[in-house]
Each structure stands twice: as C-alpha cells, then as structure tokens.
Amino acid sequence: MNPIQRFFSQLSERFATLSQGQKVAALVLATVTIGSILAMSFWIKTPDLQLLYANLSEQDASAIVDNLKSQKIPYELSNQGKTIRVPANQVHEVRLKMASEGLPEGSEVGLEIFDKTSLGMTDFIQKLNFQRALQGELSRTIKTLDAVDHARVHLVIPKQTLFIREKPKGKASVTIKTKAGKFLNESQVQGIVHLVSASVEGITADNVAVVDVKGNLLSGSQEMNAGAARSSSNYQHKRRVEQELEKNILAMLEDALGQGMVIARVTADLDFEKNDHTEEIYDPDSAVVRSSQTASESVVGATPTGGVIGVQAQLPAGQNEGGTGTSGQPSKRDKNNQVQNFEINKITRVVSKPTGTVNKLSVAVMINGIMAENDAGDEEYQARTQEEMDKYTQIVQSAVGYNQERGDQIKVENIQFDRSVEQQRLADLEREKNIDLAFQAGKYILGLVFVILFYTRAIKPLITWITTTVKPDEEQEEEKVAEEGMTDAQKEDEEELRRLEEGLASATEMRKSVTDFIESDPKYTAGVVRKWLREKAGATQA
C-alpha cells in the first residue's frame, strides 16, 4: 500500500469513529481549508492591472472588451465602463494590437451611416445624415494630426439654389484639443482651415473658424493669416538661430562640467529687411572700340569737252583736281574716309542683402558650482574661481561667434542652482517605487505567513488526528466492559494508582531540573546549601 492509499485509509477509519456532529465539523473544516487555499492562490496570482484606455464611448468600450475576450486577456472595467485596465506587462502590446484594428474609433459617425438605409427615410433625414457624416469624417482626419488629441467639426452647408447671385455661403467651425505639451503653429492651423474648406462645397477658407478648448481663436482672415505667417516664419527662424547657439554652448560646457550644470539663453537681433541695389562702375582708362568704318573712293577718266560742270568749271585753269588742266585731257581722283567710335568700359552689378542676418547677440549663461566636503566632513556649496569663469567666458564667445564691433553682449555668472523641486520629484519617484516594491513583497510575505499559520493551526493538527492509531472496536469494547465490571474499591485503587504515577512523573521531572541546576552552577548551589545548614543549626539551638 502506497502512502497516499494509507493516508486515505486512515482518514476513512478515523472519520468512521466520529459522531454525527464531529463529521459535520470535519467536513466544514475541510471545505474552509480548501477554499482558503484556493482564495490565497488566486490572490497571489492576481495580475497588476494598469490603465489601457479612459473616457471611452460605449461603442469603443464594447468593441475593445470583445477583442480582449477573444484574446483571453484579463481586464477590469471602472468608471461606468469607460475605463479599461489590463495586466501591466501587456499594456503596450494590447495598445498596438488595438491600433492595428482601428480601435478605439471614437464616437464620431462617419460615412458608414449610409451602410444601412431605410426606405422611408425623408430628404431632410438624408441631408442631416450627410452633414453628420461629413462632420465625423473631418473630425477623424483632424485627429490624425500628431498634436491633436480631440477635434469636433460643425458645418453649415449652404442650400442649393438656381440663382448664382443669390447662392449662400457655407460656414464651418472646428474645436481643437491638443495633447499635453504640444501646440499647433500657424501653418498647422492654416492646414486645418484649408482641409475643411476643400472638403465641403460652398465653404471658403475665410468662413472657417478654428478655436481651442479654452475659446482662443486660432484662425483669422486671409490678410491677417498672411501677415501672421510671415511673422511666424521670421520668429521661427529667430528661434532656430537662438536654439542652435544655445546648443553649441551646452555641447561645449556640459561635456566638461556635467549634465544639468549649465543654463544658456541666447537672444538674437536679426535683420529681416530685404535690400537690393544696382551699381554701375566705369573705367575711363579702359577704352574699347565700339565700331569702325572706312570709306575709299577713286575716279579715273577724261574731262568732258565743254568743261567740268559745276564749281570746278568756275575755277581758273590748272586748278582742277586730278585733271590735266586742259579740256579733254585724262584726270584721276582718290578719296579715303575712316570713322572709329570708342566706348568707356562699364560694369553693372546688382547687390542683394540677405535677410535674417545677425545685428546683435545677447548671451546669458549660468554655471552651477560644485558640492565638496568641508573640514568637518559635510558637503557644502563651493563657487567657481574667477580663473575658471574667465575660461568659460572665452569658450562661450567662441561658441556663438562673438563680434565686439557688432555690439554683442555675453554674461557668464556662477550661481547656485535650486534643485529642491527635482530632488523632491526624484524622492517621490523613489518612494513610490519602494511602496510598490514593499506592497509586492508584503503580498507574498502575507501569503506565506497565512500558509504557515494555516498549516500549523489547521492542517498539521488535522493530519496528526488522522494519522493517530485507531484502536479496534473490539479493544474499545473490552476496556468498556472491564471498567463496568469494577467495584468502587477497585475504581478508587485505579484512581490512586493513576495519581501515584503522575506524582512519580512530577518527582522525576523535578529531580532532573535540580540536577541540571546544580551542574550549571555548582558554587552557587553550595552557597545555598551552606545557608540552609546555618539556618537549620540556628533553629536547633533556639
């Protein structure tokens, strides 16, 4: 017989000897024991639940719960079913899984409203559903932006008319709730405006208003938007320049001093005016031939008999050019003419001044000191030396491109930083971490203590009671009969014998105790005995 069979055999024999009330008590005890063990195991194995989603709509909550059930992932509902918690080690995995399936969808109604249509739907209901669908689709699209947490769109769709001149204009309004730590710049707001105006017929960008959850108007007229866009662009360029210079300062100083030991701020005065001018440069010493013209004429022939017609006919004889001087004689005439035009060298240059040039820089840098031990061994703040500050000033000048002629100002100071808030935050985090750790440890320790107490107070006595040798029924009957056949004198003798055995046992234990005491401290025992003897001798003499 194996140990398990022997145990159950003894248990059945012991259970058979119990009375009816004892049997009921034993069954109740066994039930409570098993239930307690199961409850403790379930409590220990209960997972640590963390927030998955909050403020869900009923549709999204229902879809997410069905998805969790299909994946057999434990969950917990709270806040009237709007908040769902799952085990901490599965939060990120479940969110990615839900996102891949398009959950949560949101409470907005999109074009899926037309998936189910009714034959008795009126024209008014159809137009209303179409408006709701457009609003829902635009809200979903706007919420896909990285900085947008929630969006709601209201549309006023213009009515169709046969007259073009009397065609009304539509309007739209958009309410935006941004995520924590994020904001929408002017270009993003204009993107939302044009998204709405381009998605709905009859609505122009001028008739789209964008506000935040605090009621601040984020959009305006086109003229204002254009000016704001330019101003925003200039401001963003200015901030990029300042941030780049701050980054240069921190990159050089924090590598030497440590993270969080330097605070740098740069203010840049930039020139955004655009100036173009044309220059013409003349070089009088450099003459360039622009054009050259040469003309040559030669006439050979005889003079007519009647003389030369014209002015030459009036001239005295012998003065005719190229002639023989006499009528009818051969004559020759040559004529050369050359013309050259010169031009002075000219250079034309268009000079454009770039926008966003630096007019002046103002730099402020704060450097924290160090914590060092004093003579007493306590940590105290020690400021930087003047030599160190001069060195750091030169480093800052090199990092920002310091130009004294431009009027740049650089101020580097040694100031003790106030780290109390950060230290308190770190202390709070450490305390929360310790509390969580203590809670987890206490959870297991409490379970272990419960198991030990339950074993020592319930399980072990029950096992001892079960495994105690049970006398056969025949022996019990014989003892009962023997006791009934005894006389009163025999019963008294039996009782006296029992008391004598108990007294002998007590005397034996007392003797053993005295012996142990004498062996542990013989000198003290001898002194006690001498004292007893003196007291006895004094009593005898008296």
Image: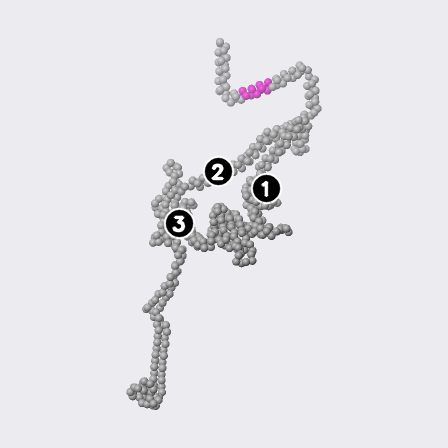
Extreme-top residue of the structure: 542
Residue flagged by tag 2: what amino acid is it? Arg
Of callouts 1 and 2, the N-terminal one: 1
Please report the residue visible at 59 percent of the width from the left and 42 percent of the height from the top.
74
* Residue highlighted by disc 3: 266
Task: Give, as a single range, the part of the protein colored magenta.
Answer: 503-515
Q: Nearer the viewer, residue 92 or 304?
A: 304
- Looking at the picture, does residue 224 appear above or below residue 30? below
Q: Nearer the viewer, residue 232 or 157?
A: 157
Q: In the drawing, does residue 484 fall left or right of residue 276?
A: right
Q: Position of residue 385 (x, y in %)?
A: 35, 44
Q: Secondary structure at mark 2?
A: helix
Please report the residue visible at 45 percent of the width from the left and 55 percent of the height from the top.
223
Q: Position of residue 103 (x, y in %)?
A: 57, 47
Q: In the drawing, does residue 244 fall left or right of residue 167?
A: left
Q: Secondary structure at mark 3?
A: strand
Crowding at dot 1, Cα within 10 Å, few <14 / some 14-19 / many 20+, comes out as: some
* Residue highlighted by disc 2: 431
Residue flagged by tag 3: what amino acid is it? Val
Residue flagged by tag 1: what amino acid is it? Pro
* Residue highlighted by disc 1: 74
Q: Position of residue 421 (x, y in %)?
A: 44, 40
Please report the residue visible at 55 percent of the width from the left and 34 percent of the height from the top.
445
Q: How many marks?
A: 3
Of callouts 2 and 3, the N-terminal one: 3
